[in-house]
Image (cartoon, grey):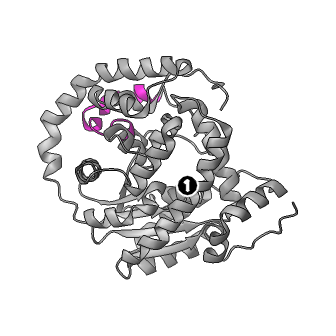
């Protein structure tokens, strides 16, 4: 891929421990010359935030470890760009839930000690996400994977930070292929501790999680939380392809630490969709009856409240106290416009050739390939 157009140096790994940062660099092939300023920013901030992590561990670790997760989490899953963010923000209006915030993902092992600095750090955030026009807010819902990238050597976000090593990172972090049993347990422990920390910060509320990589991690998540509930979203494959490709370009432009080629990026988009959703179809059979709800994005946006009522009924969740918050959110979002994509013949050909199973599985109309 061409060199980044933007020369921002701020990076989500700024609070990573120095030991983990060195481990990441060694296992992913280092940093390319054009991105050394970003790497220097991470290194300096990693060293500078070390005392905060130490203080966090001394003050909170025992309390976090002893925090019970009484209410099994609700995991929103589905391929990237399938409407998971929209559903996450909508369901986060329900007072029975707590959510993982952007603030917590940036400082997953120190956020409890840095609350006074939150307004200052907010000045370094962009106003909207790079892949769409959704507003960025410190306390707004965000996906767990950003925290895992700070806590673990295996995270899908490392595919974006180290794109030359994206294939290995994807297979290890999502399908756990090529990791040892000890490494798998290390990943589970890091995730469990983070969820406990968020639960502790929210006085034991049920966690509402949104994390597309979890779509093919159902078996591992059920090992951690046997009674967890899942909400899976599907969306028109043509639109998912176009939106995912755009997202990968935009995110790499502001977050990458290595170069990659257009051909490699295209192949990752194609392959990851198949692997993620085939993984879901294989593992969803492990979910206990009454703990999985499946919804089409198109139905959700056409009649949000109706679809949410169906989801709550399928999962056995109480909805009465949540309805006013849902309606308020929908009223505020009434003017928001989603991205509009032109589905050209080349897109139809690529998607038809690679993702045929998705049309059959989720009953989306398949367009004719004119090429």
Identify whether 62 is placed above or below 241.
above
Q: Is residue 323 left or right of residue 244?
A: left
Looking at the image, the residue that sits furthest to the front is 178
Q: Is residue 323 visible?
A: no
Circle 1: element type: helix
Which range of residues does the magenta coloring cover? 105-122
Residue 265 horizontal/vertical position (percent): 62, 43
Does the magenta-highlighted stretch encompass residue 332? no
Residue 251 horizontal/vertical position (percent): 58, 38
- In the rendered image, which residue does mark 1 sit on? 272
What secondary structure is the stretch in magenta mostly built from? helix
Q: Residue at left 17%, top 54%?
A: 67
Q: Is residue 365 left or right of residue 128?
A: right
Q: Residue at left 32%, top 26%?
A: 22
Identify whether 120 is placed above or below 281.
above
Q: Is residue 48 left or right of residue 295?
A: left
Looking at the image, the residue that sits furthest to the right is 370
Looking at the image, the residue that sits furthest to the bottom is 289
Identify whether 257 is placed above or below 343.
above
């Amino acid at each position: 891929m061409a060199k980044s157009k933007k020369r921002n140096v701020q990076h989500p790994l700024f609070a990573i421990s120095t030991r983990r940062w060195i481990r990441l660099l060694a296992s992913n092939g280092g940093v390319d010359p054009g991105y050394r300023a970003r790497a220097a920013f991470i290194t300096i901030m990693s060293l500078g935030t070390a005392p905060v992590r130490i203080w966090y561990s001394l003050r909170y670790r025992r309390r976090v470890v002893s925090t019970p997760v009484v209410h099994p989490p609700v995991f929103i899953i589905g391929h990237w760009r399938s409407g998971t963010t929209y559903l996450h923000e909508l369901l986060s209006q329900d007072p029975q839930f707590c959510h993982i915030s952007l603030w917590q993902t940036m400082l997953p092992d120190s956020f409890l000690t840095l609350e006074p600095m939150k307004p200052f750090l907010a000045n370094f955030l962009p106003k909207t996400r790079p892949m769409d026009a959704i507003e960025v807010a410190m306390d707004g819902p965000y996906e767990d994977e950003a925290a895992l990238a700070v806590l673990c050597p295996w995270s899908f976000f490392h595919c974006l930070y180290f794109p030359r090593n994206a294939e290995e990172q994807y297979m290890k972090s999502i399908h756990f292929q090529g990791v040892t049993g000890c490494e798998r347990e290390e990943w589970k422990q890091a995730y469990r501790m983070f969820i406990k920390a968020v639960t502790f910060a929210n006085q034991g509320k049920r966690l509402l999680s949104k994390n597309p990589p979890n779509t093919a991690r159902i078996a591992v998540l059920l090992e951690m939380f046997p009674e967890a509930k899942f909400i899976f979203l599907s969306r028109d494959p043509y639109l998912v392809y176009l939106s995912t490709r755009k997202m990968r370009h935009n995110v790499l432009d502001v977050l990458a630490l290595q170069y990659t080629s257009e051909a490699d990026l295209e192949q990752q988009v194609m392959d990851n969709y198949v692997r993620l959703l085939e993984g879901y179809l294989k593992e969803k059979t492990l979910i206990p009856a009454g703990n999985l709800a499946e919804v089409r994005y198109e139905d959700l946006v056409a009649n949000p409240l109706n679809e949410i009522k169906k989801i709550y009924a399928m999962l056995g969740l109480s909805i009465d106290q949540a309805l006013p918050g849902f309606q308020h959110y929908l009223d505020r979002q009434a003017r928001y416009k989603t991205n509009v994509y032109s589905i050209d013949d080349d897109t139809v050909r690529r998607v038809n050739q690679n993702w045929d199973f998705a049309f059959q599985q989720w009953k989306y109309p398949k367009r004719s390939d004119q090429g």
